[in-house]
Image (spheres, grey):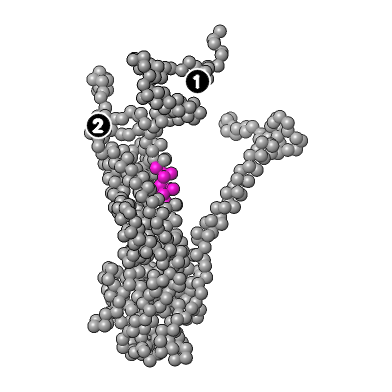
Amino acid sequence: MANLKPPLPRALKPKPKGPSEDNGTGKAGLKDKAADKGISVVDWVDERTSLSGGARWLMFRKIPKGTNWFYTLGSASLFAFLSQAVTGVILAMYYDPSATRAYESMRYLTNEVFLGEFVRGMHKWGSSVMVILVFLHMARTFFWGAYKYPRELNWVIGVVLLILTLFMSFTGYLLPFDQRSFWATTVGVAINGTGPLVGPYLNDFLRAGPEFGTTTLARFYALHMLVLPGAIAAMIGAHLYLVARLGTTAPPWIRADIDPDLRKDET
Amino acid sequence: MPVSRERKEPKKPKTTAEAQIPGAFEGETVSRRRFMTGTVHAAGGIAAAAFTLPAVGLAFGPVFEKQEEHWQSVGPIGDFADDTYVPRTLTLVRGIGDVGKSTVYIRKYNSELDDEQRDEYNEFIAISTRCMHLGCPVRFVEASERFICPCHGGVYDFQGKVAGGPPVRPLDRFYTRVRNGNLEVGPRFSVNSELKRFSPRDPGMPLDGIGQYLYPARPSVRKIPGT
């Protein structure tokens, strides 16, 4: 008869020795005690969430032979997005999205606030960097053939992310509200309007009316800092899940090692 | 004898009692579990719609919002000649400062040049400065009697008709009227290449041929009826 008793819960099992009891010297230093505390905190959380399995699944994956620096372009895009998110949140603390105050609030931020010009510059140049990185990442995926089965869905999600990134650039361009951004947005909205049948209605939605009006700027601001970043974050989550689930591809010049005996059988 | 291909489908039970679901009532056709599931889904759907629909309506509301027709005085009629344009500043959108202002070029109707039907709205011709390619501001160049756009090289002749470059239709115009010796400028309208009036459209939307159907006017902003 097999043992039918349920396994002991982890908390009741004897604890493995921590660094303070098992460091070979017999003496527990301050560092060992701190390590003990850290381990017990992580244990406490893990016992209640089982997060460690998911973290291992996400981070300790098998990587194909031939993986090289081009495989960092995806992470680079992710960090460009995070940098935009962090600097954008801080910029929002100084920005006033009203047609009469926007330019003045940007002037104040740029000329008067400590590090204002620097953080605004990071956000401004970072947006171009993000678009460039996303395109390079896409080119790598395309030329390596990494979009093929079973990764087609991840390619589709990536294209959605590219479009969302370009929408971010479009809506963000208006926010400084100087001559350049006003006329660029006028032209951009007109281009959008040339889509037959739906174009005129999309224009009215973007401008909040038939003309560039009092709420147009607020609308672009809401899209730029709430709707689009939320959508991008959700899509990045799906993108990363599929990367972890399916793994990465080897570069096309890497061939699988085939047993010479098997090769003989095939011919 | 050919084999009958007819397959005997098992009869679908009509009531829960026939399906032998425990605790079935007599004549009951939907099990209580299914009814409960449906009720919960419906309640969730109604709750989600209760906040989604008003929010979407708020975002798209401006598309249907009626625009008030308003007329602005631009000076005594003696200020305007029939052989050149005089620039005037109009406030197109109120409440947003300089951004809501736009330049309009005005001249008198010239019977040697203009051949459109005269009515109470075109004794003076007011030409919008919005380029009909993509909406940049055009300016009137006196020496060449042309409207020139700085962005992509659109050129319009003295009447505002396309003379060259990428624009898809003549420059938009504004209704004008004379009140107490003063000229007033009213709502904007669009024209096709024969200068026929249409409800106002955005730049980039052609009005010749099927253009007027491909790019419908917004329901809330129309030209003055009968003009």
Q: Along the horizontal axis of the image, is B46 left or right of A137?
A: right
Question: Picture coordinates of residue B78 (x, y %)?
Answer: 38, 91
User: Where is the N terminus of chain A found, in terms of image quarters?
Assistant: top right
**Residue A233 falls within the magenta-colored stretch:** yes
Residue B214 in sight in this render:
no
Report the Cα–Cα distance between label 2 and label 1. Answer: 41 Å
The magenta segment is: A227-236
The residue at the point 29 percent across, 72 percent down is B149
Comparing A243 with B215, the one in front is A243
Secondary structure mostly taken by the magenta-highlighted segment of the chain = helix
The residue most toward the top is A1
Query: Which residue corresponds to the image point at 69% horizontal and 36% vertical from the top-left?
Result: B31
Chain under callout 1: A
The residue drawn where x is 31% and y is 34% is A249
Residue density around tag 1, few if under 14, some if 14–19, many if 20 or more, within 10 Å = few
Which kind of residue does numbered mark 1 sit on?
Answer: Arg
User: Is residue B69 one of those drawn in magenta?
Assistant: no
| A51 lies above or below A91 | above
Q: Is residue A144 above or below residue A19?
A: below
Residue occupied by mark 1? A10
Q: Residue B206: which quarter of the image?
A: bottom left
| Residue A169, quarter of picture | bottom left
Element marked by disc 2: loop
**Disc 2 residue crowd, few under 14, some 14–19, many 20+, Cα 10 Å:** few
Please identify the quadrant where the C terminus of chain A is shown: top left
Chain where mark 2 sits:
A
Q: Is residue A153 left or right of residue B151?
A: right
